[in-house]
Structures are given as structure tokens and as C-alpha cells.
Amino acid sequence: MSVNAYQPVLDPASSGRMFWFDKHDTRVLFGDIRDESWELCDGRRFDVKPDMEMDYRDLPFPDGTFRMVVLDPPHLRHVGENAYMAKKYGALDPETWQEDLRLMFRECFRVLKPYGVLIFKWNEVQIPLSKILKLCDEKPLFGNKQPKQTGTHWIVFMKPGTEEQ
């Protein structure tokens, strides 16, 4: 599937598209490095079926392609390869996770149009948000700063631009 004018939004780590109201919204290009399905313990199917397979560290798009990037990368680095959480959400490489996330941020900002918006979701159950934000060259606009119940943060960034753009 190629990008078109009706797909101004990229989700490069969409996994099972769990937080999307419409899991098939035509305005969104759903990507993931995985393409797989399996049966959950209760008999339901869980699908990771991206529109396009992609690696968020090396996105296959020209600079300035999207108006918005929604980014919910794997957040666990200590998890068994076949564990339910790893299968459902993916896992970070325990050795390269910092460089991987640094590249992820650079790539996601590269494919944003000037003044494009990046919405970032992070759960700090294993890695504090403060460590993650140090891997990003851009400054966040706003987000929920103290999510006491879940440990999940939503952070909004805007790519810089010039007044002419």
C-alpha cells in the first residue's frame, strides 16, 4: 500500500491497533515490523496486520510526508520472547534500545511535514519517561505529566517549521 493524500497520519508501530476507535481508518497508514496472528488464552484471535511492514528506525518515506505520526513503540526491554506481553506489544532489544529509540524519533520527525504533530505514548513500567525524552532532539508541547494509575504517558510534539511553510 502506498501513501496517498487521504493518509495524512502514520502509525509506524501499530501492533493490534488497540487504542484506535476505527482500526481501519483510511486516513491512517498502519505499519509494524511484524505481520502475525495468534490465539489468545481465551480463544480470541490477536492480529498484528499492518497495511505496510516497516521499521520505525528506517521509514520508507520521503521527508515531510505526513501531517501526524502516532507513536506507541514497545516499552518492555525485560520480557520473555514468547511472553504474552512481548507478543502483544513487541519488545525492545535489551542492548540497543536507546539507539533504536533515538533513531525512531529522528525518523518519525523526518517524515513529518513542518508543524506536523507527533503524538507519543509511553508506559514507564520499566524505563522512566525522563530517560526516553533525552533520546529525542525535539521539545514536547504538552502531555499528562503524572499518570499515577497506569504509568502511561501521552506526549504531544510539533515539528518546527518556518512561517513560509
Image: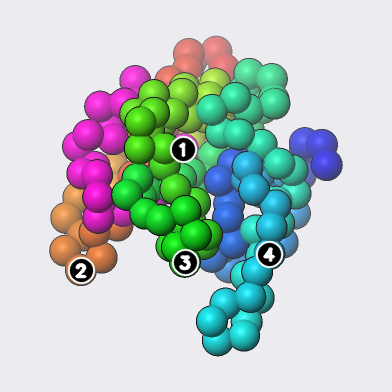
Tell me what residue is drawn at x 56 percent, y 46 percent. 13
Q: Could you tell me which secondary element the residue under label 2 belongs to?
A: loop
Dot 4 and dot 3 residues touching (CB under 8 Å): no
Q: Amino acid at mark 1?
A: Leu
Q: Which residue is mark 4?
A: 37
Tell me what residue is drawn at x 51 percent, y 45 percent. 70
Gap in angstroms between the C-alphas marked 2 and 1: 24 Å
Q: Earlier in the sequence, mark 1 or mark 4?
A: 4
User: Mark 2: few, some, or many residues within 10 Å (few <14, many ≥20)?
Assistant: few
Q: Position of residue 61 (x, y in %)?
A: 69, 25
Q: Nearer the viewer, residue 26 or 35?
A: 35
Q: Quadrant of the C terminus?
A: top right
Gap in angstroms between the C-alphas marked 2 and 3: 22 Å
Q: Is 40 located above or below residue 129 in the figure?
A: below
Q: Which residue is mark 1?
A: 118
Of tags 2 and 3, the one toward the viewer is 3
Tell me what residue is drawn at x 64 percent, y 48 percent. 34
Q: Earlier in the sequence, mark 1 or mark 3?
A: 3
Of tags 1 and 3, the one toward the viewer is 3
